[in-house]
Image: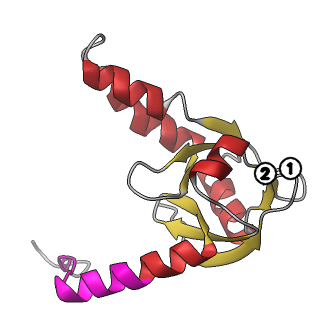
């Protein structure tokens, strides 16, 4: 499975364009698409960038909600109403919608951050503070992942 890894510094130009890092465009090509979906993160001041097939797979779970429920109404409005399809141009640039720029409080300096199957677009200063907080939280809570069995061993 392809993952988006690393933190890449970039700039938001006056036309609202950013360059998607070449490594991330390569990961998109591995998945078989350059089509992406930009959505504001629910829990952080950043933009989540989903490869379109992964966004479609994730959002298919929305259809499991009751049609006229408050949860479906709320989630549908923020998941689909705030979503913007995009595709990098020949130079690897995408245009960020003004509403997403404002909501994520992006300035000229941005960080494009791998986050497993998606990547995120952050204000560089806010991301640096967030990373420091998360590292400390991981230490304080002694967070770890379960070890997997070595290949070829019986489980």
**Residue located at (66% from left, 76% from top):** 8
Q: Nearer the viewer, mark 2 or mark 1?
A: 2
Tell me which label, 2 or 1, sits earlier in the chain. 1
Looking at the rendered image, the quarter that the C terminus falls into is bottom left
Q: Which residues, given as a range, are shown in magenta?
A: 132-149
Q: Give 37 or 104, whichever is nearer the viewer.
A: 104
**Residue located at (66% from left, 61% from top):** 106
Q: Is residue 75 left or right of residue 145?
A: right
Say what secondary structure mark 2 lies in: strand
Say what secondary structure mark 1 lies in: loop
On residue 19, the disc is: none
Tell me if residue 6 can be seen.
no
Q: Is residue 127 above or below residue 24?
A: below
Q: Is residue 60 above or below residue 49?
A: above
Q: Is residue 56 left or right of residue 87?
A: left
Q: Residue 1's spot in the image, x, y percent?
A: 46, 60
Residue tagged by mark 2?
94
Evaluate if marks 2 and 1 touch, with contact meaning CB atoms under 8 Å apart.
yes
């Amino acid at each position: 499975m392809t993952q988006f890894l690393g933190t890449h510094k970039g700039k938001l130009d006056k036309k609202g364009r950013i360059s998607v890092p070449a490594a991330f465009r390569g990961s998109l090509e591995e998945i078989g698409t350059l089509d992406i979906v930009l959505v504001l993160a629910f829990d952080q001041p950043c933009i989540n960038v989903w490869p379109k097939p992964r966004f479609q797979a994730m959002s298919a779970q929305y259809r499991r909600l009751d049609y006229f429920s408050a949860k479906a109404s709320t989630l549908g409005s923020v998941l689909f109403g705030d979503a913007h399809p995009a595709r990098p141009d020949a130079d690897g640039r995408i245009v960020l919608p003004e509403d997403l720029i404002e909501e994520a409080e992006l300035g000229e300096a941005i960080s494009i951050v791998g986050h497993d199957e998606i990547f995120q677009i952050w204000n560089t200063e806010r991301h640096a503070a967030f990373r420091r907080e998360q590292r400390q939280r991981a230490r304080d809570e002694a967070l770890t992942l379960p070890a997997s069995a070595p290949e070829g061993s019986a489980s």
